[in-house]
Image (spheres, grey):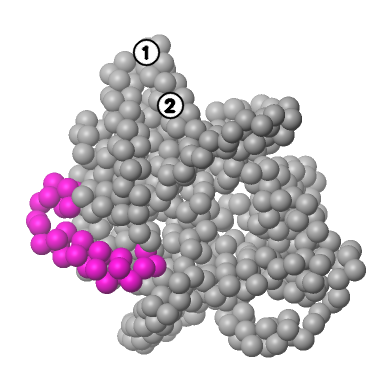
Amino acid sequence: MVFSNTLFIYLFLPLNLLIYFLVKDIKAKNITLLVFSLIFYSWGEPKWIILLLFTSIINYYAGIFIEKNKDTKESKKWLIYSIIINLCSLLIFKYTAFIFENINELFNLAIKIPDIPFPLGISFYTFHVISYTVDVYKGHVKAQKSYYKFLLYISLYPQLVAGPIVRYSQVEDEIDYRESSIDNINDGINRFIVGLGKKVLIANVAGKLVEQYMNSNLYDLTVVGAWLGIVMFTIQMYFDFSGYSDMAIGLGKIFGFKYLENFNYPYISKSATEFWRRWHISLGSFFRDYVYIPLGGNKKNMVTNLFIVWLLTGIWHGASWNFIVWGLYFGIIIYFEKKLILKILNRIPKIVSHIYLLTVVVIGWTIFYFTNLTDSIKYLKIMFGLSNNSIINTETKLEIVNNIFWIILALIGTTPIIPYIKRKILEKDREYILTILVVIINVMILILSTAMLIGDSYNPFLYFRF
C-alpha cells in the first residue's frame, strides 16, 4: 500500500483515524497504530512481515542485553552481533544477486543467480534498528523494555517503507506521551496534502516525460530532448521523495509524532557539500553520526573516511554498479570542494556557483538513472553535444510548448518562494487570508490528485526500490 492511493486516502487512513481518536488512553492508541502499521506493511506481500518481526525481536533483546551489560565486553559483543545480523539480512535480500552476477562475470562462471525478492522498506528499517542499538550502547537512549512499543517504533507506517530514517531518540518520549492537538492535526493534514500534490501532480507527470525521453532509443534522441528528459528526472526525484517525506511528516504530526525535516530545498544550493546537507537529511546525518565520525571524521584519515561514506551511500541506494559510481562521483566532488573548490565558490557570483551545482547534480542523476554505465556515457555525450544527434526536433518543441507553464510551476516549487509569500502575508497580519487560501488550495490539490489517481495507473514511488 502507498500513501498516494485512493484506498489509503479514502478508506485505510479515515478508518485508522476514527479508531485512533475514539480510544482514549495512550496504550490503546499505540496498539491501534501498531495493528494498522502491520496491516499497511503486509498489504502487498504478507510474507515479509515475518522478516520485520524477526528484525524487531533480535534488536529488542539486543538493546536489553547491551544495557544490562553496560561498560563490559558483553555489551560490545551484543552490539556487534546485532549489527552483523542486521547487515547480513540487508546483504542477503538486497545484494545477493548483484554479488553472484559479478562473481560470474569476474571468473567466467555460470552460477545460477538466486531469485530473492526485495522486502519493502528493508533499507530504512535496518538503519532504524542499527541507530537504536548503537545509541543504547553509547548511553544516548534507554533500552525499550516493552516489545510492543519497540515494534511500534520499527513498524510505524508513516516512516516504515521509505523514510525518513527516524532515530529512537527522536520519538522515545512520544511513544509514551504525545498530544494530537487541533493545530497539529490541521498542520499534519495540510502537510500530507501538499506531499500528495507533489507526488501526483508533479512527480508522476514528470515521470511520464522521463520515460518518454530517457527510455527512448538514444540514437534518435536530440540534444534538447536529452536535457528535457534529465531535467524532468531531476524534478521527479525531488518531488517524489520530498512528497513522500511531506506525507510521512504530516501523518506523524496527526498522530503526535514530530519527525525531523528530510529536505530543505536542495536545488537552491551552491555546492555539492551544501546540496547533501539539504537532500535526504536523515540519511546524510545517519552516515555522518554512525560511520564518518566514528571512523575519525575530519580529524583522522579524512579522505578515507569520506570515500567510505560515499561508497556506502551509493551501495545503500541499490545493488548496481551505477549506484556505486554515483556515490563515488559525489565523494570525489565533495573532496575537491573541501580542498579547493569551496574557496572559489565563495568568491564567485552566486549565480555561477548555483549553475555549477545544478550541472554537478544533473550529471549525477544521469549516472543514477541508467543501471548500464555505457548508456549513462552515451546520454551525457548527447546532452553536451559530443555525439552526432540532432539539436532538436518538432516533437520536442511541441512537448516543451505544451508543458512550459507546468515546468515553470514545478521549478518554482523547488525554491522557497511559497514559504516566503506565506511569511509576508503573516507579517501583514493577514492570517485569515492565508487560512482561506490554504483551504482552497488543499481542496483543489485533493480533487485534482484524486482525479489523476483514478484515471491513471502510473503511480510509482522511486525510493521504494531502495
Image location (x, y in percent) of residue 270: 69, 60
Q: In the picture provided, is 280 more to the left or to the right than 186? A: right
Instruction: Specify which label sits upstream in the sequence, 1 or 2.
Output: 1
Q: Quadrant of residue 158?
A: bottom left
Residue 13 within the magenta-colored segment of the rendering: yes
Query: Considering depth in this image, is 430 or 362 the residue closer to the camera?
Result: 362
Image location (x, y in percent) of residue 59: 34, 30
Q: In the picture provided, is 360 more to the left or to the right than 89? A: right
Above or below for 67 versus 146: above
Q: In the picture provided, is 406 more to the left or to the right than 458? A: right
Check disc 1: other Cα within 10 Å, few if <14, some if 14-19, many if 20+: some
- At 81% from the left and 67% from the top, the residue drawn is 219
Residue 98 within the magenta-colored segment of the rendering: no
**The disc labelled 1 sits on which kind of residue?**
Glu
Query: Considering depth in this image, is 103 or 338 the residue closer to the camera?
Result: 103
Asked if residue 302 can be seen in this view, the reply is no
**The disc labelled 2 sits on which kind of residue?**
Ile
* Label drawn at residue 151: none
Image location (x, y in percent) of residue 156: 30, 49
Above or below for 425 versus 209: below
Residue, disc 2? 85
* Helix, strand or loop status at disc 1: helix
Q: Main secondary structure of the magenta part?
A: helix
Image location (x, y in percent) of residue 73: 40, 11
The residue segment tinted magenta is 3-32
Give the quarter of the figure containing the N terminus.
Answer: bottom left
Query: In the image, which is nearer the foreground, mark 1 or mark 2?
Result: 2
Q: Quadrant of residue 390?
A: bottom right
- At 63% from the left and 65% from the top, the residue drawn is 234
Q: Quadrant of residue 399?
A: bottom right
Check disc 2: other Cα within 10 Å, few if <14, some if 14-19, many if 20+: some
Residue, disc 1? 74
